[in-house]
Amino acid sequence: MEEIKSINRILEEYPYLSKRHDGFPSVGKNISEFSNPVRKIADGFSLYDSLIATRFNDSRKEYNFTSGDPLQYEAFPPIKDAMHKYIESEFSYKYPYSEGDDRIREILVNYLKQEGVINTDPYNYSDINDVGLSKYNLTFTIATSHAFQCIMDIITRPKDVIIVPAPNYGLFAIRPERMNADVVVLPLKEEDNYLPNPERLEKIIKETNENLKNKYKDLGYTPKVVGFLNANPSNPTGKVMGKSEYNRLKAIGTVCKNNGVFIIDDLVYRDISYSEEEKALPMSTIPGMFRNTISLFGLSKSYGLASLRSGFVVADEVIIREIVNRIFQEMDAIPAIIGESLGGAFNNTPERNEEYKKYFNNLRQEYINRYKVFKSLIMGIDSIDYEDRENIFNLLIKHSTNKDYYSLLDKGINGVNIMNNLEPEAGFFLLLNFNELKGLHYKDITINNEFDLLKYLYQDIKLRFILGSGCLWPNNEDLIGRFTFAKPYEDLIEVSTLMNESTKKLVR
């Protein structure tokens, strides 16, 4: 092959581009430069790459339970109506503005007011409404991932720190370190119901700031803790902080505000909180918290439109101004269809609110049913409340002609259970505990750690899932896997049966 000098210069900078691969794209930054918890996430992605590379020599069906895809379900009808209306309008020929369409921004402001968002310390502009909000408090983004990247770029300087509760969404832990910031983990405890403890949070903030002050004396500034990632509901635990956790949320918000730490309030799973009464409560609904909170909303997890990558950010005007600047500098503007989709989803019209109740009552039940079916197959039917068992049996009978699952309903999967006190209240993930398999072996594989576990199950039944380290599970000794149950019933039944057969092969 002819040597191209211009290409060679690129390869010198990015040597990993010299080979084609079909796994995950690069997570960025050399793995050796990541902090310990984040390096383990990156190592996990590298392992997935090597696993995926083997699939071309293996014709068996692959079971991918790593996915963050929501349930295959009809997209929220008002979104489809809004998008169709826009495409057929006379305005689709026009380029959008960097900040987004003012009409849509006003619609979203009215939605936020309906949801209880309030700014008790607004600027003195004439267009600010009675709850202290205006269109200048929000802008559109390419999903919450793009929003988070922009926010990290704006609020962090080199060696600043983002505190991330653990467990959490692994890729959000990687992004700050790509900006040359650092991640410090706040381990969540079972005694706190795996929710952030405000006192522990403040202790970590103060200790981290003291360490940074002592460590970095030649930067021209003192790095500090600048952000706390508050995923509500949580990925992967499915825990929700709703109105019954108001005091906890207020305490978290107060700790962050008093210490100059932004709250990044990730609300993307909010609408699939299983209880409408205990739906995740945005931090910005608490008086006094709005200006120190950066809220992320999106369509990907709840509204059946993950492929659209549609989201918006709500924050103090200062933050929004700079996000708009970055959008202009990087891509000129967010696609107008994203704004239209957001306006269809998040408005306060009676028609939308009526459709919302019907749509989400049904969708939440679909998730609850799948969760209970998966739980019954993992831990046995005795783990299910008596009044739910008939429904579980009917779903299993309807969706499987193979009755191998009968034995699972008696005892569950050999050596596998759901982590204590971690049954989800939202979303579509389960954290499974494989600790009983530690030290067991089959042929040349011994299960000593989570990497061994993943390699064994992929080799034996071609099953993929997210490792505990991939979602920042705080105890390195545990064998944890994050599994999605946003799957067809047939796949839940099939994978449970195969996992049981596979774990039974392991011996001491």
Image (spheres, rainbow, N blue to C red):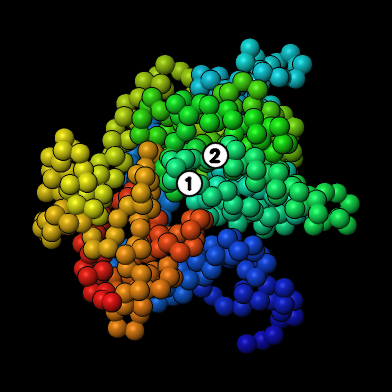
Percent position (x, y) of residue 190? 43, 45
Q: How many numbered marks have been drawn onto this rendered protein structure?
A: 2
Q: Amino acid at mark 2?
A: Asn
Q: Is residue 372 visible?
A: yes
Q: Quadrant of residue 77?
A: top left
Residue positioned 61% across, 41% down in the render: 201
Residue positioned 42% across, 16% down in the render: 350
Above or below residue 392? Residue 85 is above
Q: Amino acid at mark 1?
A: Lys
Crowding at mark 1 (Cα within 10 Å: few <14, some 14-19, many 20+): some
Instruction: Calculate the distance from the C-alpha at mark 1 to the C-alpha at mark 2.
Output: 8 Å
Disc 1 to disc 2: CB gap under 8 Å: yes
Give the labeled residue for mark 1: 189
Crowding at mark 2 (Cα within 10 Å: few <14, some 14-19, many 20+): many
Q: Is residue 304 visible?
A: no
Q: Secondary structure at mark 1?
A: loop
Percent position (x, y) of residue 46? 52, 70
Report the quarter where the C terminus lies.
bottom left
Give the labeled residue for mark 2: 197
- Relative placement, left or right, of 344 versus 124 is left
Out of 332 and 427, give the one closest to the viewer. Answer: 427
Out of 332 and 315, give the one closest to the viewer. Answer: 315
Report the quarter where the N terminus lies.
bottom right
Residue positioned 75% across, 16% down in the render: 125
Above or below residue 47? Residue 81 is above
Percent position (x, y) of residue 370? 27, 45
